[in-house]
Image (cartoon, helix red, strand yellow):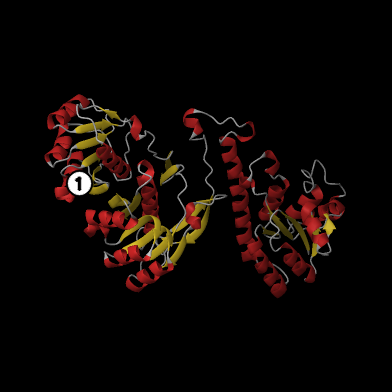
C-alpha cells in the first residue's frame, strides 16, 4: 500500500505517519511535509523520486505529473488501466492525505493551491480504490480500520470522498469571494455588482445541530460560512438546556439590537428583551439594573419565555432581579459573574446563560423558496440622527431626540408594519407585524398606556395617510420620526403641526419581513 502525504495543516501528521509506517504503508511526501517527516525520522520517498522530475517554479509544480495522477485515477477493475500502469512502471496510490492552504487567512495568488485540489479531486473521484483524507480528525479512523481490516472500508472511503469535494468546493468559494472583492488588482466592482455578484458560492459548514428546527417536526442546525469565525463561535454557555433553533435566531436579534441601542447614547447602559425576534422591551438606563427594570416594566407579560440581552456584565444583583421576574429562555451578556450563574441556576435551571463577544456586521441576507433565492445586503441604519430633517414648526428637545433614537432603532428591527413608542429612553409600546399602520399604532399606544403621553414614536415606513399619525397624537405622542416619501407627506406634516408635535424625516425606510 502506498500513501501520498502533502498537507498544510500538520496537526497530528507525525503520529499519523508513524502509524502508517508501522502498518507497512509506503510513504511518499512533498515539500514541507517531506521535511517534517525527515526531521521526525519517518522513512519516506520524496515525490521527485516517484516522478523522476524535480519540484519547480517555487513549488508550484510537484505533484502535477502522470506518475502521480495515473496512480490515483486508474480504475483497477479495468485490465487495460492496470496494463498501462505496468507498461509505465507506475505504482498505484491507495491513500492521499492532503489539506489545502488556508486561503481566507491571507488571500493572495500564492495561496491559490493547484496541486493540492487536483490530488484531492483525483483521489475522491476514484474513491472505490483510493482513500482521501482532508482533515486530521480523520486520521484515527484510517489507522483503526487499516489495523483491523488491512484496508479502509467502502463506507469510510465514500464519506471521506464527500468531505474532500466539500473541502475543495469551500476552498474555491473563498477564492471566488476574493475575486468579487477585487482580488489581486484590488478594484472591486461598483453599484449593485459590488454587493451581488453574477454567481454566489455559499460554502457553509455545520457547527452544531439544534434540538429541532422552528417546529419539532423540522430538523435544524447552525452553520457558518467556511473560513469565518462568527461571533456565535465565541459564545460560552454557562448553564441551561441545549440551545434550540429559535433560541439562536432570537438571541442573535436581541444581541444585535442591544448593541445598536447605545450607539447614539454611549454613556448609557442598554438592555433588550426579545420575543419572536421582536422587542417586547428595550431601554437605556444609568445602570444595567435600571435598564433591565425599565425594559421589563414595558411589557412583563410578553417577556415570559423571551431573550434578555445585557450589554455589559451580569452580576449577582442583576441576576437576582432576573430570577425574580418572568422565566427567560435565554440570558445573554458580555460576561457573567460566577455568583450570578449560581443564583440563576438555582432559580431558573432551564434558562440558557450565555456570555458573548460583540456581534460582527451583518452580511448578505439570503432567503430561499424552492429553487429560488432572494439575496440582498444587510439593512443598516445609514442616516445618522444628525442628518434627520425636522419638517414641523416645533423643534425637538435633547430628550425627544434620545427617545426618537431609541424608538427608531427598535422600530427598524421590528417586523413590519411597525410602530414603536419610547419615553425616557424606554421602548414603552411596540406594534409589530400588522397589515395596517393604523392598527400597529393602536397596538403600540394601547401597550404604552399612560406612558404614551409625552412619548416619541417611530414608524418603519411613511404614513400613507394622516390617520396613523392622528392615532399617535390622540394618545399623547409629542414627537414622531418616519422616513417620509409619501405623496401625502404635506398632509401628514400639516396634521403634525396642527397637533403641535415634532416630526423628523430620515429619508430611509426599514421594512422587515
Is residue 498 rendered to the left or right of residue 11?
Answer: left
Percent across and percent down for residue 488 are 20, 26
The residue lying toward the viewer, choosing from 25 and 391, is: 391
| Quadrant of the frame with the N terminus | bottom right
The residue lying toward the viewer, choosing from 266 and 83, is: 266
The residue lying toward the viewer, choosing from 222 and 307, is: 307
Percent across and percent down for residue 376 are 42, 38
Position of 496 relative to 7 (above/below): above
| Quadrant of the frame with the C terminus | top left
Percent across and percent down for residue 456 are 22, 40
Question: Residue, x 37% and y 38% (percent of image)?
Answer: 381
Position of 126 relative to 473 (above/below): below
Camera sees residue 218: no
- How many badges with numbers are in the image? 1
Mark 1, secondary structure of its residue: helix
Is residue 478 rendered to the left or right of residue 407?
Answer: left
The residue identified by callout 1 is 444
Image quadrant assignment for residue 217: bottom left
Camera sees residue 143: yes
Image quadrant assignment for residue 214: bottom left
Q: Residues within 10 Å of mark 1 (few under 14, many from 20)?
A: many
Image quadrant assignment for residue 367: top left
Question: Residue, x 46% and y 42% (percent of image)?
Answer: 364
Percent across and percent down for residue 148 are 69, 75
Position of 76 relative to 395 (above/below): below
Amino acid at each position: 500500500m502506498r500513501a501520498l502525504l502533502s498537507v498544510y495543516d500538520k496537526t497530528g501528521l507525525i503520529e499519523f505517519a508513524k502509524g502508517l509506517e508501522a502498518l507497512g504503508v509506503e510513504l511518499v511526501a512533498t515539500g514541507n511535509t517531506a521535511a517534517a517527516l525527515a526531521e521526525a525520522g519517518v522513512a519516506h520517498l520524496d515525490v521527485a523520486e516517484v516522478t523522476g522530475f524535480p519540484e519547480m517554479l517555487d513549488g508550484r509544480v510537484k505533484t502535477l505529473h502522470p506518475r502521480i495522477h495515473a496512480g490515483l485515477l486508474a480504475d483497477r477493475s479495468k485490465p487495460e488501466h492496470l496494463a498501462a500502469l505496468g507498461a509505465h512502471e507506475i505504482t498505484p496510490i491507495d491513500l492521499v492525505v492532503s489539506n489545502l492552504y488556508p486561503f481566507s487567512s491571507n488571500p493572495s495568488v500564492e495561496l491559490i493551491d493547484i496541486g493540492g485540489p487536483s490530488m484531492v479531486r483525483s483521489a475522491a473521484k476514484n474513491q472505490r480504490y483510493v482513500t482521501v483524507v482532508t482533515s486530521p480528525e480523520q486520521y484515527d479512523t484510517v489507522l483503526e480500520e487499516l489495523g483491523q481490516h488491512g484496508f479502509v472500508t467502502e463506507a469510510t472511503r465514500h464519506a471521506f470522498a464527500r468531505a474532500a469535494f466539500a473541502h475543495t468546493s469551500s476552498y474555491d468559494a473563498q477564492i471566488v469571494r476574493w475575486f468579487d472583492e477585487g482580488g489581486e488588482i484590488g478594484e472591486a466592482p461598483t453599484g449593485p455588482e459590488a454587493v451581488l455578484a453574477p454567481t454566489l458560492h455559499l460554502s457553509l459548514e455545520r457547527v452544531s445541530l439544534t434540538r429541532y428546527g422552528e417546529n419539532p417536526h423540522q430538523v435544524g442546525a447552525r452553520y457558518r460560512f467556511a473560513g469565518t469565525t462568527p461571533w456565535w463561535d465565541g459564545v460560552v454557555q454557562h448553564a441551561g438546556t441545549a440551545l434550540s433553533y429559535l433560541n439562536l435566531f432570537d438571541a442573535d436579534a436581541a444581541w444585535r439590537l442591544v448593541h445598536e441601542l447605545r450607539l447614539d447614547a454611549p454613556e448609557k447602559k442598554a438592555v433588550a428583551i426579545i420575543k419572536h425576534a421582536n422587542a417586547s422591551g428595550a431601554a437605556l438606563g444609568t445602570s444595567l439594573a435600571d435598564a433591565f427594570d425599565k425594559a421589563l416594566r414595558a411589557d412583563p407579560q410578553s417577556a415570559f419565555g423571551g431573550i434578555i440581552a445585557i450589554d455589559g456584565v451580569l452580576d449577582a444583583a442583576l441576576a437576582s432581579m432576573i430570577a425574580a421576574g418572568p422565566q427567560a429562555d435565554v440570558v445573554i451578556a458580555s460576561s457573567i459573574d460566577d455568583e450570578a450563574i449560581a443564583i440563576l441556576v438555582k432559580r431558573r435551571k432551564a434558562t440558557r446563560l450565555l456570555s458573548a463577544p460583540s456581534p460582527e456586521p451583518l452580511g448578505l441576507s439570503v432567503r430561499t423558496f424552492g429553487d429560488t433565492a432572494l439575496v440582498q445586503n444587510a439593512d443598516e441604519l445609514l442616516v445618522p440622527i444628525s442628518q434627520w430633517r425636522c419638517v414641523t414648526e416645533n423643534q425637538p428637545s435633547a430628550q425627544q431626540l434620545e427617545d426618537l433614537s431609541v424608538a427608531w432603532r427598535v422600530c427598524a428591527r421590528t417586523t413590519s408594519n411597525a410602530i414603536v413608542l419610547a419615553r425616557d429612553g424606554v421602548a414603552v409600546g411596540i406594534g409589530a407585524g400588522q397589515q395596517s399602520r393604523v392598527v400597529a399604532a393602536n397596538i403600540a399606544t394601547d401597550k404604552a398606556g399612560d406612558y404614551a403621553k409625552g412619548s416619541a414614536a417611530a414608524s418603519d415606513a411613511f404614513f400613507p395617510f394622516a390617520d396613523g399619525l392622528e392615532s399617535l397624537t390622540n394618545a399623547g405622542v409629542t414627537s414622531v420620526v418616519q422616513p417620509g416619501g409619501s405623496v401625502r407627506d404635506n398632509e401628514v406634516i400639516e396634521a403634525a403641526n396642527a397637533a403641535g408635535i415634532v416630526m423628523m424625516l430620515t429619508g430611509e425606510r426599514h421594512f422587515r419581513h
